[in-house]
Amino acid sequence: MNTKTKSIVYWTMTGLIAFFIGGGGLGQMAQYRANPHGVVPELGYPMYFFAILGFWKLLGAIAILVPRYPLLKEWAYAGIFFDLTGAAASCAWVGGYGAYGFHIIAPLVLTGFTVASWALRPQSRTIGILLPAGEKQQTGIGSRAAHTA
């Protein structure tokens, strides 16, 4: 994939995630009464939980959009991933309410968008390489030095 295509796909996926996660977060914070955040009583979560969740979703959407702060972006992507997979699991647990399991499939599709956004992000939005190729960790769990000591 060339650089231009990669950039277009990255920004498309990132924009979609920010739109859906941020918009959902705003709705949850507002606790819109006609449709309480797309949440049904079958899930069994207290309503205040969704206001808290909405706050963090909004911050996560902002974090993946703004420049710099690569470590914050890593945490935001992880939080979004956990939110979406948790939503799918919660809905599956109660029997996948709704037509054709939409409330299970939609979060999983968005999870795919999240992983694509994370994987395609530019170098300036990553925390870098933790262990450069060719260097071996000399101490710590799983290293040879740790097993011989």
Image (cartoon, helix red, strand yellow):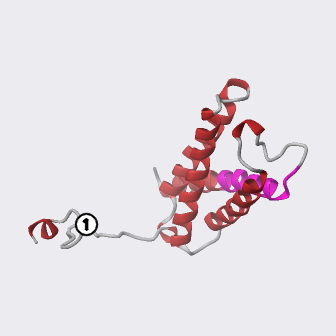
Q: Residue at x 71, y 50 (%)?
A: 20
Q: Few, some or many C-alpha atoms within 10 Å of disc 1 (few <14, some 14-19, many ≥20)?
A: few
Task: Label 1, secondary structure: give it.
Answer: loop
Query: Please, which residue is most extreme toward the right here?
Result: 34
Q: For this rendering, which residue is in front, 63 or 88? A: 88
The residue that mark 1 highlights is: 133
Determine the main secondary structure of the stretch shown in magenta. helix
Query: Please, which residue is most extreme toward the left here?
Result: 148
Q: For this rendering, which residue is in front, 90 or 144? A: 90
Q: Work out whether 102 lies above or below 3.
A: above
Q: Is residue 10 magenta?
A: no
Could one spot residue 8 in this view of the protein?
A: no
Could one spot residue 16 in this view of the protein?
A: yes
Q: Residue at x 52, y 57 (%)?
A: 118
Mark 1: amino acid? Ala
19 on left or right of 79:
right
Q: Residue at x 71, y 47 (%)?
A: 45
Q: Work out whether 37 lies above or below 3.
A: above
Q: For this rendering, which residue is in front, 30 or 46? A: 46
Location of residue 103 in the rendering, given as x and y in whole percent from the top left corner: 68, 35
Location of residue 86 in the rendering, given as x and y in whole percent from the top left corner: 59, 46
Q: Which region is colored magenta? A: 15-32
